[in-house]
Image (cartoon, helix red, strand yellow):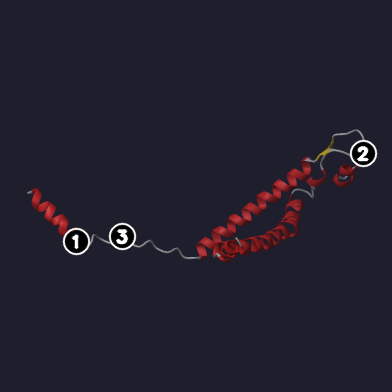
Amino acid sequence: MLQEFKTFIARGNVLDLAVGVIIGASFGAIVKSLTDDLIMPIVGAVIGGIDFSNYFVPLSSKVTATSLAAAREQGAVFAYGNFITVAINFMIIAWIIFLLVKAVNRAIPKKEAEAPAGPSDEVKLLTEIRDSLKK
């Protein structure tokens, strides 16, 4: 069993996956910083500085707080504003990844498909024989 495990780990696919996960986590941090620190402030300035993250509806009469974090400590809340913020972040991240993939696809030249090779000499000869026999 230990030998099988070593063989499994030594395969390139597992190592490729590990590298992909590590790079993906790092890339996720970069994209999160891009959206949180650069893009969302611009979006906030364009729409008048509205911060959706503190919009909520208290589900309990005990909740009297005005910020989402404080309201969650007091009881259950329906945090629709936080959902709107996360949805906007997702759309921005999806757009950035789309543009990145599009740029990479343009930068890396595609291999042209090789023209299919013509029939071999044997096939040509057999075709001629068949056609001769039909006459």
Pinpoint residue 4: horizontal percent, then vertical percent: 57, 62
Of residues 111 and 91, which is closer to you in this image? 111
Pinpoint residue 11: horizontal percent, then vertical percent: 55, 64
SS of the residue at dot 3?
Answer: loop
Q: Amino acid at mark 2?
A: Thr
Q: Amino acid at mark 1?
A: Glu
SS of the residue at dot 2?
Answer: loop
Q: CA distance from mark 3 to mark 2?
A: 73 Å
Q: Nearer the viewer, mark 3 or mark 1?
A: 1
Residue on which disc 1 sits: 122
| Residue at 79% in and 50% down | 49
Would you call the spot at circle 1 few (<14 residues within 10 Å), some (14-19), or many (20 or more)?
Answer: few
First in sequence, mark 3 or 2: give its number: 2
Q: Please report contact status of discs 3 and 1: CB closer than 8 Å, yes or no.
A: no
First in sequence, mark 1 or 2: give its number: 2
Q: Please report contact status of discs 1 and 2: CB closer than 8 Å, yes or no.
A: no
SS of the residue at dot 1?
Answer: helix
Label annotation for residue 51: none
Q: Nearer the viewer, mark 1 or mark 2?
A: 1
Q: Amino acid at mark 3?
A: Pro
Q: CA distance from mark 3 to mark 1?
A: 17 Å
Measured along the vertical axis of the image, is residue 63 above or below residue 28? Answer: above
Residue on which disc 2 sits: 64
Label annotation for residue 116: 3
Pinpoint residue 132: horizontal percent, then vertical percent: 9, 53
Pinpoint residue 120: horizontal percent, then vertical percent: 23, 62
First in sequence, mark 3 or 1: give its number: 3
Q: CA distance from mark 1 to mark 2?
A: 88 Å
Report the quarter where the N terminus lies: bottom right
Would you call the spot at circle 2 few (<14 residues within 10 Å), some (14-19), or many (20 or more)?
Answer: few
